[in-house]
Amino acid sequence: RLGGNGIADSCVYGRLVVKAVAEYIRTEKAKVPETASDQINALISHYLEPFDRSTGDGPFELRDRLQEINWNNVGVVRNEKDLSAAVEEFRSINEEAAKIKIQGVRAYNMPWNEYISLLNMLEVSQMVAQSALQRNESRGAHHRSDYPERNDAYGLFNIFLHKNSNQMPI
């Protein structure tokens, strides 16, 4: 099972990273960069937008749809047809997510928490599907039924994505 030791790994390596960064800062007299306040304010505004909408549905149906698409189209065994369909569906969900309305107060607001989780799951789903589409081979846990063989002449590279003007990974 691929994720079986994920929590233990996160705890162990997370602690090691924090200790290494603290030591680096202490010994190198490194200056911790200041946080970009305009970026923080933009994120706050972005996550509060659903409270300002007068109409719209909640996030639960979109979350369920996103999970279903991932299960059926971006799962363990992948192919170009399903991955392309998933990318299109993710675009649609992204547009619908921009219309979600959240009611109530922010504290202990389950729909708002799900909205934020949905945005994060959607972004990761888009990146996984786009990356899987670009890798025309099978390697490790990535298996393409339309490219079942590993191809070292082709596959020894990393895939980097960035966001376009619509905030979609490309």
Image (cartoon, rainbow, N blue to C red):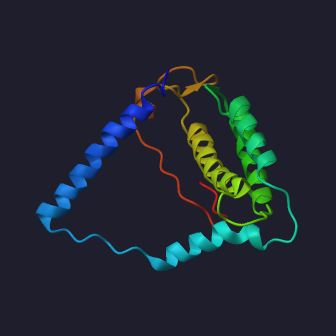
Q: In the picture provided, is 29 more to the left or to the right than 108?
A: left
Q: How many marks?
A: 0
Q: Position of residue 98 (x, y in %)?
A: 76, 63
| Front residue of 148 and 104 | 104
Quick one: which residue is furthest to the bottom in this view?
Answer: 38
Q: Is 75 on the left-hand or right-hand side of 58? A: left
The x, y position of residue 5, in whole percent, is 42, 27
The residue shown at (81%, 46%) is: 61
Q: Quadrant of residue 105?
A: bottom right
Residue at 77% over, 59% down: 95
Residue 16 to residue 55: above or below: above
Q: Please state which of residues 124 and 63 is positioned toward the viewer in this rendering.
A: 63
Q: Position of residue 160 (x, y in %)?
A: 48, 50
Image quadrant holding the C terminus, namely bottom right
Note whether 158 is above or below 57 in the view shown: above
Residue 60 at x, y percent in the picture: 78, 47
Judged left or right of residue 103, residue 24 is left
Q: Which of the pair 40/148 is nearer the observer?
A: 40
Give 127 or 137, whichever is nearer the viewer: 127
